[in-house]
Image (cartoon, rainbow, N blue to C red):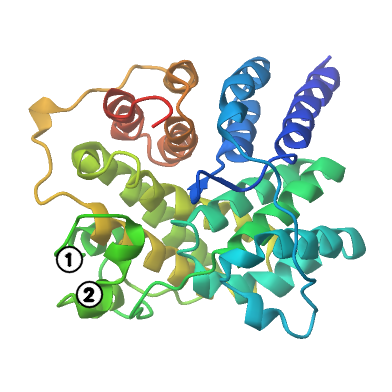
Amino acid sequence: MANVSVMNTDGTLDEAYERLHRTGPEFEGWLTNHGPMAAESMVRRGHAREVHRWLDGYIRRLEELPRGTWPIAADDWHVALGDPRRLGDWLTFFEREVKEQPWRSVLETWWPRLLPGIAAGATHGVIRTGHAVHALLSHEDGPRLAEFGQALGYWATRWQPVPATAAPSGTAGSPHALAAIPRVPDQRDGINHRLDQLADVPGWTSALAALKPAADAEQARDRISQLADAATLRYLPNAHGSAIMLVHSATAPTAVLRTLPALPTTLWGASLAAAWAAGAAVTAAYAPAEPMPRQSLPTAPDSAAEVFARAVRHQDEHVIKLADTCLDVYQRTNDPDALAAVIRAIDLIEPGS
């Protein structure tokens, strides 16, 4: 019976991917299609039965898959990197790549090319890739390979570096390093306006360098895990700065962490530096001036499963993605604030916002 159950949930995710692959990675000009990420989280967390009902509502907001304009050749991909006009071309390029090569080979080639542009789509490029890799590590088939290709295509299209980055070279652990990240002075408008300020923020580069580096690949993995933990636990008292955008300070490092098992260990050190830059940049862009006092914050229910079920009932895609990360953090740390962070997101985020 266990094998039948696994096959059923695998089928639900593949069906969801097939529905979503008729839609584009963005809608309404620049908003990210979260459908594949939320569906993968729901299936993996035991909520496969709710996926299609959730998609019935969500998919109405989405737009058709964009068409390409002219092909991207293997030897001149640099010129199309980060060009939103080439979205259809990038999707076609990676559709071909994952059909012609083993997906792990595609990932090994393109991860170091795409990683410097980890800010792509407000970090959604790497987040969608992390969910796709997580699904492929469980089971390989056509819909999952297609999702992996679409994730990479979206990342390549929106490829965007974090300004003025510095590799970890200090002595601070993730909680202290994140707490010391300076805020951008003008917190109006969207993420691009905020990221553009980073190079001129006093102390930004030195704050990035303050994180303790990794001596080897295993330490790099542990540092990324600690970064995801710290960002998740910081969400609880700081979510009022931007309840939606601060989700990505935790989910982007989590996506990198989930991709590591499919990567050569020689790429784990660079993955740490990029995950740290992404989490720190989102923190700088959206953290509030002051955290909320403890007495004003929710406490967590006893059951992690109930917390995720609440996120699914809430229906918002950002809440579902955050809950997925929070359950990972709770499993590693046993800290109830990781679960309380989900309740905080439910309180602050309007479904479909």
> Do residues under tags 2 and 1 come within 8 Å of each other at their CB atoms?
yes
Q: Is residue 316 visible?
A: yes
Q: Position of residue 279 (x, y in %)?
A: 37, 59
Q: Which mark is residue 204?
A: 2
Q: Which mark is residue 182?
A: 1
Q: Position of residue 151 (x, y in %)?
A: 66, 54
Q: Nearer the viewer, residue 179 or 11?
A: 11
Q: Amino acid at mark 2?
A: Trp
Per the model, the C-alpha gap separating discs 2 and 1 is 6 Å
Q: Residue furthest right?
A: 100
Q: Is residue 278 above or below residue 49?
A: below
Judging from the image, what secondary structure is the residue with disc 2 in? helix
- The disc, 2 or 1, on the residue closer to the chain's N-terminal end is 1
Q: Residues within 10 Å of mark 2 (few under 14, many from 20)?
A: many
In which quarter of the view is residue 110 placed?
bottom right
Q: Position of residue 35 (x, y in %)?
A: 60, 35
Left of 37 or right of it: where is 348? left
Judging from the image, what secondary structure is the residue with disc 1 in? loop
Q: Position of residue 103 (x, y in %)?
A: 80, 60
- Residue drawn at (50%, 50%), measured in percent from left and top? 29
